[in-house]
Amino acid sequence: MASSDPLPPSSTTSQSTPPSSTSPSTTTESKQALPRITALLRQILRITTTDGRVFIGTFAGTDKPLNIVLVNTDEYRIGQQGDGRYVGQVMFPWKMIVKVEAYVKEESGTGAYYEQDLYT
């Protein structure tokens, strides 16, 4: 087989794209997820990546493959002291995301991060 030949179908993996299904229940879940994601626009998110970094920034959007875009973002490394660094606009491939948390401000004026599962 020449190196330019495509891989046979049996050698492809389903991990190259986010899981998807066309079942009726998934369609209903997708319709319910859209308002949840829309409500997060312009909210502060904290994203933890597979390499142990934490990013805090403003949620600007997502796309069909479930990549996430943050703007006005700061990067922090777990276990290191310091203030982190400003990285601006960042796009996170869905495969690199371990956890997404939304910052929710309480009526008392204090706030906390709550985990929001964007992949359900």
Image: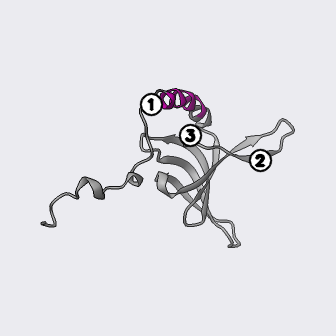
Q: Amino acid at mark 1?
A: Ser
Residue 106, image quadrant: top right
Q: Residues within 10 Å of mark 2 (few under 14, many from 20)?
A: few
Q: Nearer the viewer, residue 11 or 32?
A: 11
Is residue 92 visible to the viewer in this orientation of the structure?
no
> x and y percent of residue 103 in the render?
70, 45
Q: Amino acid at mark 3?
A: Thr
Q: Is residue 27 left or right of residue 7?
A: right
Where disc 3 sits, the SS reads loop
For the record, the magenta segment spans 25-36
Residue sitting at x 66%, y 68%: 78
Q: Where residue 34 is drawn, which disc sits there?
A: none
| Number of marks drawn | 3
Residue 15, image quadrant: bottom left
Please name the residue that numbered disc 3 is placed on: 120
**Mark pair 3, 1: CA separation:** 14 Å
Query: In the rendered structure, are the residues bearing label 2 and label 1 in contact, judged by CB atoms less than 8 Å apart?
Result: no
Where disc 1 sits, the SS reads loop
> x and y percent of residue 64 in the render?
42, 40
Please name the residue that numbered disc 1 is placed on: 23
First along the sequence among labels 2 and 1: 1
Q: Residue furthest bottom?
A: 80
Which quarter of the rendering shows the C terminus?
top right
Q: Where residue 112 is drawn, which disc sits there?
A: 2
Magenta region includes residue 87:
no
First along the sequence among labels 2 and 3: 2
Residue sitting at x 58%, y 50%: 72
Q: Nearer the viewer, residue 99 or 71?
A: 99
